[in-house]
Image (cartoon, rainbow, N blue to C red):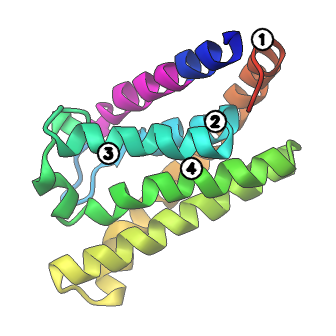
Amino acid sequence: MKSNVSNLVRDALMLGVLICLSQISVALPTAVPITLQTLAIYLIACLLTPNHAFYTVLCYLIMGAIGLPVFSNFNSGMGALIGPTGGFLFSFPIMALVMSTIITHDRSFKGHILAMIIGTAITYGLGSIYFMYTMKASLLSTLMTCVLPFLLGDALKIAVSCMIAFKLEKIVLKKTVLS
């Protein structure tokens, strides 16, 4: 029973982190803002098991879909999910699942970095494809809008999340049972 409560509390805390970091955003002249959502998802993948990571991020999407203002700039609703950035939002649970699965099998620094690079590629890929579809944009303009402006920032978020995760993993893995 204690393990279930610990897992639930940890999942809820990580959901709260995701919601809070989603509100830290910088608007760009494009349709896609710079946010700290991915930093939160990196941490979720590091600190939760694959199933818990997936369902925590899925819960975030459901909360936003039903109208709770959890997406960047306090957006919510189906409009946010079917708008130009919807593909990025829909990619987040998959990103969390894949990264957490990789990290579960390789808890080394290299494993974390590799997982986050793969997760970021998944988000870029799915988000860009959806952006191209909704905006009727070319591949080149989509890459210039949805990928290129974010490469440096995502590299920094990966570095920061690795540093935070390695500190927190020692505490979380000692105090709770990852199931």
Q: Mark 4 — residue? A: 96
Mark nearer the N terminus (4 vs 3) = 3
* Point 34% across, 55% down: residue: 89
Type of amino acid at the residue the image marks with label 4: Ala
Type of amino acid at the residue the image marks with label 3: Leu
> Is 157 situated left or right of 82 in this image?
right
Residue 71 visible here: no
Q: Mark 2 — residue? A: 161
* Point 36% across, 25% down: residue: 20
Is residue 119 shown above or below 179?
A: below
Q: Mark 1 to mark 3: distance in Å?
A: 28 Å
Q: Mark 4 to mark 3: distance in Å?
A: 13 Å
Q: Which stretch appears magenta?
A: 11-25
Q: Foreground mark, 2 or 1?
A: 1
Q: Quadrant of the C terminus?
A: top right
Question: What secondary structure do most residues of the magenta stretch adopt?
Answer: helix
Q: Which mark is residue 175?
A: 1
* Point 63% across, 35% down: residue: 161
Mark nearer the N terminus (2 vs 1) = 2
Mark nearer the N terminus (1 vs 3) = 3
Q: Is residue 137 magenta?
A: no
Q: Is residue 19 magenta?
A: yes
Q: Mark 3 — residue? A: 61
Q: Position of residue 81 (x, y in %)?
A: 21, 57
Q: Do the residues bearing badges 3 and 2 touch, measured as CB atoms within 8 Å?
A: no
Residue at the outermost front position:
1
Q: Secondary structure at mark 1?
A: helix
Q: Position of residue 35 (x, y in %)?
A: 36, 42
Type of amino acid at the residue the image marks with label 1: Lys
Residue 105 visible here: yes
Q: Secondary structure at mark 4?
A: helix
